[in-house]
Amino acid sequence: PYPYYAELRQQDPVHRLEGEDVFLVTQHADCERVLAEPEVYSNKAGPGLRQSELMGTAKAPEDSPYRVVRTLLTNDPPSHTRYRKLVAKAFSARRVAAMEPKIRALADELIDTFPADGKLDFVRDFARPLPLTVIADFLGVPRSDLGIFRKWSDDAAEVLGGTLTPERSKECHDSLQELLGYFDQRLAERRLQPSEDFLGLLLDARVGGERPLTTEEMLSISYVTLVAGNETTVNLLSSMMLLLLRNPDQLARVRADHSKIPVAVEEALRMEAPVQGSMRRAKQDTELAGRHIPEGSRVLIVSGSANRDPEVFADADRFDVDRTNPRSHLSFGKGIHFCLGAALSRLEGTVALEHLLARLDSIEVDPDFVPSYQDNAVLRSLRSLPVHVRKES
Ligand code: HEM
């Protein structure tokens, strides 16, 4: 998509999609402006390039016992502000830091399964299992339930994907109901036996003298956390590895100096934004970069393009582990909806790369490999990454 973004940035930075009420915003400064004006640009954007809720082709059956309600991602102030406060403890820096030893152990366990000298699919064998297990731990799902949790999680993500056959849609919705039912049971256990885990903290969350979270809200928050946190981090790990393999000089620099690892993670986030765009809906007639945006139109903040805007990043198409402003990308959004899992996914990226570099003497991509991405307008999901590894002797 990047040559297309570059063309739009230069020629039509607020571009109206033909035949649709959707505007693509591709310059960094304009994206920041949309992100900074939630009173004009609502997150209740509805279905479209992103099936941001259970809508459109994959509508939930009327008789579903559990409903997903607007809490964080698809909500606006003042209600959104209240939820952000209520979830603050569940996403605290302390809780993220406590995940570090688990992520280290997990990265090592996965590398243990690699052949000593042989081939593997980095997406299937590392990038996919790591974030799923981490998010399960983060949400308090025990390892023994990971198998079924994986299935629910994949099916729940598919609900957002868009065009499903009626049979598949039903299966995925049944799965989502099971997932929410599972969280509901865990909540019931926490009510009897208080716990400091994710659900336990949501149960105890209070803001001033206001009412606590309802069960429906807690289940919705857990669901949105899973959906927002799993596939995105898979994409980060996959893209980071591909970028390093395609830029051997940069890989060598990181190998020689591990203090560059965090910048390598940021560069991967910048160059291959795992979420390429975030949708908004204009609440009123407005103007952006001289272009009239009618009330009700949808506006796509194209982070994947903002991240390569030469106004902000010198030599923007270059993966550069010495970049001086590596965090100026918009891959985690900005402002009131700034990603609640940013610290956790940065930690996963950093720890993963540390352990891979420490334990692999070499990692090479199959020379005939041509990257292929899942058919999704918003998520940048590499399907596979065949590599040859040699482990430390
Ligand atoms: C919000 C990206 C990982 C939980 C967001 C937004 C972006 C984003 C762009 C803002 C969307 C908008 O403004 O409409 C990413 C990327 C990730 C990642 C690229 C990985 C590389 C995670 C993880 C978690 C998480 C690991 C959970 C532990 C959330 C939640 C929100 C959010 C709950 C909603 C915040 C709100 O609306 O106030 N994420 N995310 N994300 N993210 Fe992440």
Image (spheres, rainbow, N blue to C red):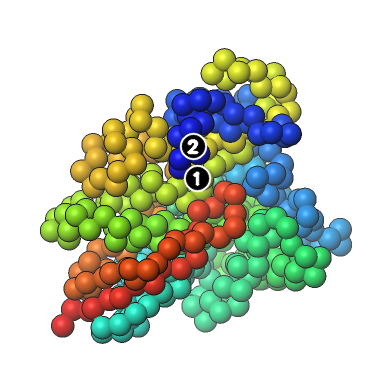
Q: Secondary structure at mark 2?
A: helix
Amino acid type, callout 1: Pro
Q: Which residue is mark 1?
A: 1
> Dot 2, crowdedness within 10 Å: few (<14), some or many (≥20)?
many
Q: Which mark is residue 5?
A: 2
Q: Nearer the viewer, residue 175 or 99?
A: 175
Describe residue 325's horizontal placement relative to residue 296 as left or right. Answer: left
Report whether the residue tagged 1 is closer than 8 Å to ligand 1: no
In which quarter of the view is residue 70 placed? top right
Q: Nearer the viewer, residue 383 or 228?
A: 383
- Up the image or down, 39 lies above or below 50; here it is above
In which quarter of the view is residue 42 placed? top right
Asked if the residue at tag 2 contacts the one at tag 1, i.e. Cβ–Cβ closer than 8 Å, the answer is yes
Furthest-left residue in this view? 256
Q: CA distance from mark 1 to mark 2?
A: 6 Å
Residue at x 70%, y 70% (from the top left corner): 175
Q: Nearer the viewer, residue 29 or 230?
A: 29
